[in-house]
Image (cartoon, rainbow, N blue to C red):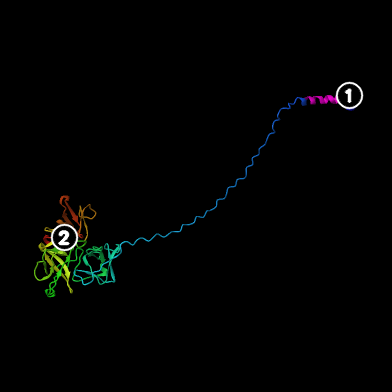
Amino acid sequence: MMSRFPLWARFVLGFAMLLPMACNLTNVDPTRTPPPSPTITVTVNPPTFTPTPTNTVIPTATKIPSAPKPTGTPIYRLSQPLPSYVCAIVPNVDASNIRSGPGTNFPVIGVMPAGNWVMPSRLANSGWYQIVALGTVVNGGWISSTVVDLQQPCICTPDACTESGIVPPIASVPSSIPGIGLAGLKPSGAASCVITAGDVDLEVYNSPQGLPPVIAKLIAHRGMPATDYRDLRYAITFSTETQLLVGWVNANRVTIEGDCARLTTPIICSVQSSTGQTVGIYAEPKRDAKLLDGMNEFSTKPFIQSNPDGWFSVNLGFAGSGWIAPDEGRLVGPCDNGQ
């Protein structure tokens, strides 16, 4: 259609069309800072990986053995070569163990080799001897009767080893009177009563009545363990080269040390332990009754009466009275027909 117009007309028309565009260009502020193009920030999160737990092997600690414990006090070796001078037990094995109590469950505190001896103080019902070894760590210890022999004519009961009532025949009395006794002897353990002569030698008689013959001399200022008491005399035991003897010394001519009261006979009818150990005194004559008191092997309680079952009623002084089981007590002293 533009070809219908002459050249000049076409020139004018094209100019007219360009003029508005030129005007728009002149209106742009040349000092204006064009706005910045928008920046698009893309955050890329790296993939997160959860590590698979691994089993850490913990090494097992090696147990270090503990240091050996000290062995403590060495075992005491009791050495008293034969022959003995008192009622004695002697090993029938290579060596007899000495224990702290009457049983194999008690620890060994010493040993007595064959060819030696020790004086027993009593034989418990369990078959264990309690021994006298003055001045040693095994004094008052225990030896099983299965590993020793009792030297005769010694007699042992749960109460004592005394040879009471055994009187050697006169023909067997040694022609020369021996002197006996130990200097500085003190009560200890099972030898709880010691008698000591004064300034002169004392006669040791053959019988508790103080009748001849005199079978030994207790040397001045020397002592012996007392094992019994009768008729105002204390019994002692000693041995010669050939035999064991029992002698009696006037009580009013010796000094006594220790618990000698247990050897004296009560002046009234009394009850004493028959088990060789402490027994219970009950509120009623039955073992499930209330326990009022205890009585050791060396004590006595005044006797009141017996019940039909054999229980002993005893006087407890201000505490009233109590009962001792028939198999745990016995009557001692001046009792009328055993009642």
**Residue bearing mark 1:** 9
**Picture residue at 88% right of the left edge, 27% below the top:** 2
Classify mark 2: helix, strand or loop.
Answer: strand
Is residue 323 visible in the rendered image? The answer is yes
* Numbered label tally: 2
- Which contiguous range is marked in magenta? 11-23
Circle nearer the N terminus (2, 1): 1
Depth check, front residue: 182 or 144: 182
Classify mark 1: helix, strand or loop.
Answer: helix
Based on the picture, tell me whether residue 33 belongs to the magenta stretch: no
Quadrant containing the C terminus in the rendered view: bottom left
Q: Is residue 75 left or right of residue 84?
A: right
Based on the picture, tell me whether residue 19 belongs to the magenta stretch: yes
How far across and down, in percent of the image, does residue 72 sit?
32, 61
How far across and down, in percent of the image, does residue 203 sit?
10, 68
Image quadrant of residue 71?
bottom left
Amino acid identity at mark 1: Ala
Magenta stretch mostly in which secondary structure? helix
Placement of 40 over or under 83, stated as above or below: above
How far across and down, in percent of the image, does residue 315 sit?
15, 53
Depth check, front residue: 305 or 144: 144
- Mark 2 surroundings within 10 Å by alpha-carbon count, few (fewer than 14), some (14 through 19), many (20 or more): some
Find residue 257 and name its label.
Answer: 2
Is residue 275 visible in the rendered image? The answer is no
**Picture residue at 78% right of the left edge, 24% below the top:** 23
